[in-house]
Each structure stands twice: as C-alpha cells, then as structure tokens.
Image (cartoon, helix red, strand yellow):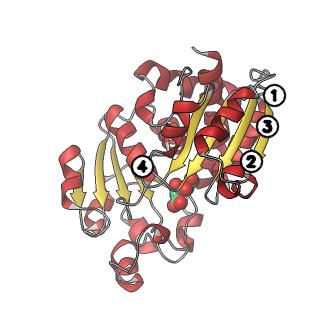
Amino acid sequence: MRTRRSLLDLDDLTAEELTEVFARAGAFEASTPEKRLAGVACVNLFFEPSTRTFTSFNLAELRLGAEVVNLAPKDLSYLNKGETIEDTVITLSAMGIGVLVVRHPEEGFPASVAMNFDGHVVNAGDGTHAHPTQALLDLYTLLEEFASLRGRDIAVVGDVVHSRVARSLLAGLKRLGANVRLVGPEAFVPQHYGDGGAVVERDFDRVLPDVDAVLLLRIQRERFAGAPISDEEYIARYRLDAPRLKKLRKKAIVLHPGPYNRGIELDESVLRFPGWRYTTQVMHGVSVRMAVLDLLVNGT
Ligand code: NCD
C-alpha cells in the first residue's frame, strides 16, 4: 500500500510546492547543499535509454548525500526468473529503500510500482504519459528568463502527440498562466489538442514573431510505425534554422529537452543562437531534481 508521497506527474504538486521546488533548486545552485538525503537509499531503475535524466538523478542523489544504487533491467529477477514486478518492489521496500526513480516505456508503470512500494516513487518518464521532472526544469528555465509566465507566449513545436515531455509541460504552462501554441502537422498535433486551452497552429513561420519562447521536440520515432510526414516536408515546414531564427522576437529563447536531432528539428545555427538555452536546461536538471527529492523525503 502506498504510504509516502510520490511524484508521478506534475499535478502531484500543489501550487505552493511548485514554488517551493523552484526556490530550493535556486538555493542548491547558490551554495553547497547540505547532505539532506544522508542515510536515504535511492534506486534508479531505467527500462529505457537515458543520458540526461539518468545522470542528473544520480548526481542529484549523490550531491544530497544519498546512498545510490543503479539497477539495470537486465539484472532484474522479475524479467528472467519469473518474479513479478510487485514482488520485486516488495523486496526493495524490505531493504528500506527510500526512493525509487523509475523510467519505463509503459504508461502508468511508475504509478503501479508506487502501489506496492513503501518509499517515494519518482516518475522519470513513462511511455507517452508524463515526465514531471523534465517539465519542472523546463519551467524553471523559463521562469529564470521571464520571472513570471503569466501572459507569456510559448510555442511547443513538433511531435507533441508522442511526447511525455510536452504533456507534463503543457499542464505546467497552463498552471502558470502562459499562452501556449502547439505547432506541427496534424499527425503530431491533432486538432482536438486545442480543446484544453492551447492554440493549434500548422504554420510555424506565422507563429515565430509572436512568441517569447520556442520549445522544440524530437520526432519520437520509437513510439510509432510508418512515417506520417517525410523528413523533407518536416524540415521545410518546421525545422528551426537561420531564416526562422531571424523572425523571432529580440529576446526570445529556444529550448529543447534533448536529445536533439541536428538537421531535423533544428540546424547548427540554433546551437550558436544567443537565446539557445539547452545547456542551461541540463544544468538546472540536477538542482531541480535535488529539490524534488528533498521535498518528497524531507517535506516542506
Ligand atoms: C525526453 C524523454 O526521454 O522523454 N528526453 C529527456 O528525458 N530529456 C525526450 C525525448 O526522448 O525526445
């Protein structure tokens, strides 16, 4: 039975906690953090490849003084010795593991793990469903730039339909009062996505002069079969490149959760653009994850 707070999606945090996470992330960046997770065992369990999220959770746990175990799926008895995931989780609970960070291709997998786990579960990405810590670090990066997102115009561009990053981020942008435009072809941005308050746009060039920030998404080819749009057409209509960068507002910034595909959703000119905030996002990823772990384990 679930007894401890988990972070499965952004709506697990109240408005006050959201503010608290950003404040703590800022404090962790400003000075050497205390070992606030000393004696807390954290297990990172990633069933999908990950560079940024995996490494930053590791660093976050280590910097707060936690005991860290990385459990590779190939070493799990439940995948090759007939044990169920429920029994695996019961086993980890019995060892007194405090935090389980889980990434899995199936939507809802971290939530089902949380049902049987005695500690805190953090969703590090489940299928196309949610990726709350990525949304938090994206919001933190935007807030650092704009102080408030109320009334700010943000474009989320590309394969929205297969993106857990977009799903969690949209919820956050809405909560913070931003005006969101979802930009892409019908296959990646279905018309009904406009029902939740965002505006659906097909013409990227028309949107560019009207936004404060652009968040680019990777085409998540591993999540669908076939090619709903050719690379040539996608590049022609949606790749951010030098001519499109010129259409942006003077202080506009560009974000990407990574991994980015050079030549597809962006070209090299974006990497040299003064408003390119990718490495800033990655840097904040560590402190925001420290803040989340600290909040879950130690409370407000
Ligand atoms: C994303 C993911 O895995 O959901 N990356 C990330 O965690 N920073 C986005 C992607 O795979 O395109």
Q: What amino acid type should be assigned to the residue bearing mark 4?
A: His
Residue 276 seen in this snapshot: no
Q: Are marks 1 and 2 in contact (CB under 8 Å)?
A: no
Residue that carries the numbered disc 2 in the rendered image? 71
In depth, the one of 195 and 73 nearer the eye is 73
Marks 3/1: CA distance? Answer: 9 Å
Q: Is mark 4 within 8 Å of ligand 1?
A: no
Q: Secondary structure at mark 4?
A: loop
- Horizontal side, residue 233 vs residue 100: left or right: left
Q: What amino acid type should be assigned to the residue bearing mark 1?
A: Gly
Residue 78 seen in this snapshot: yes
Q: Secondary structure at mark 2?
A: strand
Q: Nearer the viewer, mark 1 or mark 4?
A: 4
Residue that carries the numbered disc 1 in the rendered image? 65
Q: What amino acid type should be assigned to the residue bearing mark 2?
A: Leu
Q: Are marks 2 and 4 in contact (CB under 8 Å)?
A: no
Residue 292: x %, y % from top left: 59, 29
Q: What amino acid type should be assigned to the residue bearing mark 3?
A: Val
In depth, the one of 43 and 297 nearer the eye is 43
Q: Secondary structure at mark 1?
A: loop
Residue that carries the numbered disc 3 in the rendered image? 68
Marks 2/4: CA distance? Answer: 23 Å
In depth, the one of 130 and 64 nearer the eye is 130
